[in-house]
Image (spheres, grey):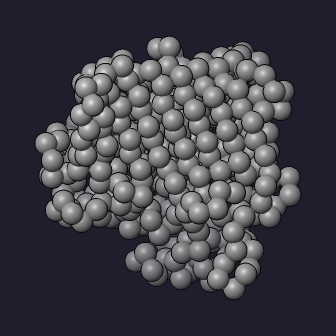
Amino acid sequence: MNAIVQATASKPLALGFIGGSLRSAVGYAHSAACGMDGRWDIAAGCFSTDETMNRETAQAYGVSEARTYRDWSSMLVQEKERLDAVLVLSPTPLHGKMVTACLERGIPVICEKSLAISGDEVRRIIAARDANKGFLAVTYNYSGYPMVRELRRIIASGRLGRILHFQAEMPQEGFIRVDAQGNKPVPQWWRLSDGDVPTIHLDLGIHLHQLIFYLIRQQPLAVVADQASNGWFSGIIDNVMCLGRYSGNVQGQFWFSKSALGHRNGLRLRIYGSEGSAEWYQANPEELILAFGNGKREILDRAASVEVANMARYARFKAGHPAGFIEAFANLYRDIADCLSSYRQTGDSYSEEVFGPELALEGLRFLEAMTLSAETGKWCDVAGIKMNQGE
């Protein structure tokens, strides 16, 4: 692939939203992040099927009434020549048809993870992208944190030695806690319906898969997993534990949960090498904890001797004012803008920071293998999932 073209657009790229209303889980985060560096402008949208919420969201995001649509299909027809990209923020089960419709109309598309609900659906999306020579980026915002990017550089430099094993966890409490008045949670409808792959995998597990690939550039080979339903919603999987065997003779442990009281969002990554280890915790995002075989321990932040996290593009606030969730999204939107600019100039694009449907396909195979393992109580070969589905 060609090296990414690092050209700054003379004006912001015009972005259309499908979903992402003020009532959605991530709509506001995307709206704030995409405009943070002046690379994107929300120009049109079909934000909600609720007419009042659709209108209120458009007003909040600064979108004119003339470019606010009651249905997303009409927006694609009317806005095809006016938008640089469409962002899909609808519930995950709706992603497939929306992303495919954009690609078939020649519109570049950005989609919130999980790209789809199954490996088969991702394969159909890839076919549509290839047939139309389209552009598709999937957002995984946690790899946008500057210190996660610093950690990737440290691993690639060999400072930790050969990677031996890792732990990746993302515990939450949303399906088992109550609010201050004692009321049970009311999740979005699609999060209360498990398909062939439980929704918690698409919500949380897909992030852990992407982060591990991002950091160590190894692929999952086989998994053994267990899962349970512990919270308020009977039959809905809300706790998953997994052991994984990866390429490069790397071992891994995963835990993701929505029934872990005390954890708001306990994303934590631990990477262990032959010469050192590293730990990053999202609740303390500006620090990396390093340890080495000689007993030496280090805590790095953006003010330390780092090479990535202290770059000017990450210095919206000086060290001591932590960059957080929305800033991580903003970093990714800047990378996607660069990729899209390269695509428009050359027909091709490449970035170490932006991922398309191929990684999404591996992630879905990984999650499908995990689900099958939990059902059978046996190790499951990730490549076997691929073959069993006709590839």
Side of 162 relative to 318 (left or right): right
Please state which of residues 237 and 16 is positioned toward the viewer in this rendering. 237
Which residue is at a point 70% across and 74% down the rendered structure image? 178
Please state which of residues 123 and 205 is positioned toward the viewer in this rendering. 205
Residue lying at the far front in this picture: please name it. Answer: 295
Name the quadrant containing residue 343. Answer: top left
Percent position (x, y) of residue 217?
42, 25
- In the image, residue 381 sits, relative to residue 279, either above or below, namely above
Side of 113 relative to 31 (left or right): right
Percent position (x, y) of residue 174?
66, 64
Is residue 85 visible from the viewing direction of this image?
no
Which residue is at a point 41% across and 50% down the rendered structure image? 281
- In the image, residue 355 sits, relative to residue 191, either above or below, namely above
Which residue is at a point 44% across and 65% down the rendered structure image? 29
Is residue 35 visible from the viewing direction of this image?
yes
Percent position (x, y) of residue 305?
13, 42
Please state which of residues 211 and 337 is positioned toward the viewer in this rendering. 211
Please state which of residues 44 and 48 is positioned toward the viewer in this rendering. 48
Which residue is at a point 58% across and 41% down the rendered structure image? 206
Side of 285 relative to 236 (left or right): left
Name the quadrant containing residue 390. Answer: top right
Q: How many marks?
A: 0
Percent position (x, y) of residue 105?
54, 45
Q: From the image, which quarter does the N terminus lie in?
A: top left
- In the image, residue 379 sits, relative to residue 107, either above or below, namely above
Side of 61 relative to 179 (left or right): left
Q: From the image, which quarter does the C terminus lie in?
A: top right
